[in-house]
Amino acid sequence: MYRTGTANLPLHGGKAPSWLTGRMRGLARPIADIMIDEYGTEKFIERLSDPYWFQALGCVLAYDWHSSGVTTVVTGLLKTVLTAEDHGVVVCGGKGKTSRKTPSDIQTAGEKWDFSQETIDNLVYTSRMTAKVDNTAIQAGYQLYHHAFLLTQDEKWAVIQQGLCDEECSARRYHWLSNNTVSFVEAPRNAVACNTKHAKVLNMVAQESEASRRASVDLSKEPPNKLMNLIQSTARPKNQASLQTWLPKSEDPWTQTQTTLNMPRNINWDTLSRIYEFQPSNYEELLAVKGVGPATVRGLALVAELVYGDEPSWEDPVKFSFAYGGKDGVPFPVDRKSMDESITILKKAVEDARVGEKEKLRSLQNLRRFVPTSNNA
């Protein structure tokens, strides 16, 4: 599967003030109008799937430059300003409980655009699998709580989802794009740089984990009682020293709990029984089975290493922009007057362009002269 990148952000509480969200909404609508009018919906969601561009959009809208709220607020705003009728693109799902409505949102949009039920079902499956990969196949300690599925009238899609890690008080955002899709379980290695990269992260969708994925599938086809014996054989007697004792200590708290020497203690054997009965033919089918969670994935990977010597990748896929200020006063307080002026200019440009005066839209490249230089970053 083609994933465009990942970003790490600190968790921030609270919410955007109403005086700001109104302006953000007023600015987001014409920006979306302009981009879709000029480049189409496919290019629009492609830009949103770029973590850097998405972050820059949050900055232009005057939200925090480095905050978990950028993800939830910007996608929430886009969900309110984008419509199937006017834009040909919608945002399904969202934060918390709203994320569970993603399938019904996809169903509603698909029916509006006369998608076949098969297409709608495939899109719902896609939504579920992108979440499954980032929540289960990659184990860095981040639990997904936000899932936004952007869908176009041309059946193109992008995913912007975010997980949180309570231990580190940080969030990690993941971006996906439908173009260049090859597989859900073998992602490219072009993740986005960030300031938090763990030394040990089980990454079952890395290219280096191909052998481990195959071995995991083979193991899942074995009778559960045989697999249980294999897993129990990896546990050391209580009076026996562990190799962990002799390994150098790490300052990374997540590394100390996620190493190749640790076996999960809460494997769901009922799930493994269902997998055995299903007999998956590949790793995607294994991962798609209901109930397969991080413990099952990790347990199979570790036994695969023990039995077959096929070690999975333990490399964190993560690799390591304000126009009007930010709501927290960073890098400077929001300049409301300049923001209002820009909204007016953008709306007028969209209106003129739609009645044939395209040259007005071209002149937006000179927008800087309407905004004080000190407010550009």
Image (cartoon, rainbow, N blue to C red):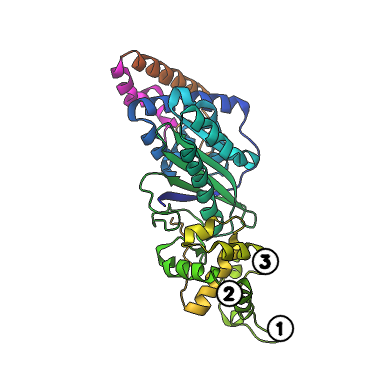
The residues bearing labels 3 and 1 have C-alpha atoms spaced at a distance of: 19 Å
* Element class at badge 1: loop
Marked residue nearer the N-terminal end (1 or 2): 1
The residue that mark 2 highlights is 249
Instruction: Examine the structure image and report whether residue 339 is included in the region drawn in magenta.
Output: no
Residue at 34% x, 24% y: name it: 364
Q: Do the residues labelled 1 and 2 touch (CB within 8 Å)?
A: no
Quarter of the image that includes the C terminus: top left
User: In the rendered structure, which amino acid carries the disc numbered 2?
Assistant: Lys
Q: Which amino acid does label 3 sit on?
A: Asn
The picture places residue 52, in percent across and down from the top left corner, at 42, 43
Give how far across and how far down residue 203 sits, in percent: 49, 62
Labelled disc at residue 266: 3
> Is residue 157 visible from the viewing direction of this image?
yes
For marks 2 and 3, give the CA distance: 25 Å
* Sequence-wise first label, 2 or 3: 2
The crowding category of the residue bearing disc 1, from other C-alpha atoms within 10 Å (few below 14, some 14 to 19, many at least 20), is: few
On the image, numbered disc 1 is attached to which residue?
238
Mark 2 Cα within 10 Å, few/some/many (few <14, many 20+)? few
Measured as percent of width and height from the top left, residue 170 is found at 59, 51
Cβ atoms under marks 3 and 1 closer than 8 Å:
no
Give the magenta-colored segment's residue range.
357-377
- Circle 2 or circle 3, nearest the eye: 3
* Dominant secondary-structure state across the stretch colored magenta: helix
Looking at the image, residue 364 sits to the left or right of residue 248; the answer is left
Q: Which of marks 3 and 1 is in front?
A: 3
The percent coordinates of residue 117 (x first, y second) are 49, 37
